[in-house]
Each structure stands twice: as structure tokens, then as C-alpha cells.
Image (spheres, rainbow, N blue to C red):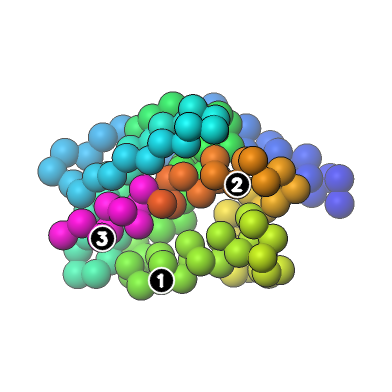
Amino acid sequence: MSELRDLYQEVILDHNRRPRNFGALEGAREAVGYNPLCGDRVTVYVRVEADTIGDIAFTGSGCAISKASASLMTDAVRGMATSDVHTLFAAFQDAVTGRREVPDDELGKLAVLTGVREFPSRVKCATLAWHALEDALARE
Ligand code: ZN
């Protein structure tokens, strides 16, 4: 278990150091998320094509958890139907709050973040980019 934990930690640190899909997308829908508890700030840019995530990127600054979560999220939802994005976010929220035991295969790589359920103050860090994505998707 602790080896798995170390591996998860490695993935988070890697995404924090080298965030994927980092940068602005011009002409895309965008929404900003701010977590005053930690000072995390993220802007999510998303292009929707035929109810599918055509392109997605983010900018911002914050703690390792918030940055890694945004990076992992953009990788996870690219090419996904928007309805599946809502389902995945619900599962992710259940997992990081500990509301429900979510099998790792439902979450894919996002499972590396489920350790935050032991640190309730970090749940907002892990879900910040997701809330911004939901806001951006709600914007037509
Ligand atoms: Zn944070």
C-alpha cells in the first residue's frame, strides 16, 4: 500500500512540475476557479464540438494538488462526451470526499488524487478545476 502511495505521490509531483495542456485557448469557453482557503487560482478553457470535449487547457497557479488535478483532468476528459464528463466528476467528487468507495477503474489516472479524502481541507484544491470546467460547460 505504501508503495502505491509513493507511486501516486510521484504522479502528482510530476503533473505539478510538468502540467499537461497548460496554456490559454483563444476563442474557447472559459471559467475561473478560486480557492481562497489555499490561494489556488485556475482558468479552464474548453472547446465543445458535437457534445464532446474537442480541446481543453488551463492556466493558473496554486498548490501541487490543484495543479496536478487540473492537469490530470484535462488529460482525462479530452475527447469525452460532455455527459460522461459530468458522470466522471460526480465519481471523482465521491472519491475525494470519501462519500462513496469508488473503484479505481472508474477514475483511471484520477485515482492518484483520492488520498486527499484524508485531508478535508485539500478537497477544494482537488475539485477546483472540475468546478471551473462545469462552469465553462454551462456557458453556451
Ligand atoms: Zn490548494
> What kind of element bears circle 1?
helix
Q: Earlier in the sequence, mark 1 or mark 3?
A: 1
Magenta: main secondary structure: helix
Q: Amino acid at mark 3?
A: Ala
Q: Secondary structure at mark 2?
A: helix
Residue 19: which numbered mark, if any?
none
Q: Say if disc 2 is inside 8 Å of ligand 1.
A: no
Give the distance between the C-alpha atoms of the residues marked 2 and 1, in whole angstroms. Answer: 21 Å
What residue would you read off at disc 2?
A: 123
- Name the residue located 28 percent from the left edge and 44 percent from the top edge: 31
Quadrant assignment, res 41: top left
Above or below for 2 versus 82: above
Residue identified by numbered label 3: 138
Q: Is residue 26 visible?
A: yes
- Could you tell me residue 53's position as x and y percent? 29, 60
Tell me if 102 is positioned left or right of 51 in this view: right
The residue labelled by disc 1 is 84
Give, as a three-letter code, the residue at label 2: Val
Frontmost residue, 26 versus 79: 26
**Residue at screen point 54% across, 40% down:** 125
79 or 35, nearer to the observer: 35
What separation in Å lies between label 3 and label 2 (alpha carbons)? 22 Å
Residue at horizontal 20 percent and vertical 49 percent from the top: 29
**Dot 3 surroundings within 10 Å: few (below 14), some, or many (20 or more)?**
few
Residue contact at pointers 2 and 1, CB within 8 angstroms = no
Residue farthest along the left direction in this orientation:
27
Residue stretch in magenta: 132-140
Q: Is mark 3 within 8 Å of ligand 1?
A: no
The quadrant where residue 49 appears: bottom left
Q: Is-magenta flag for residue 134? A: yes
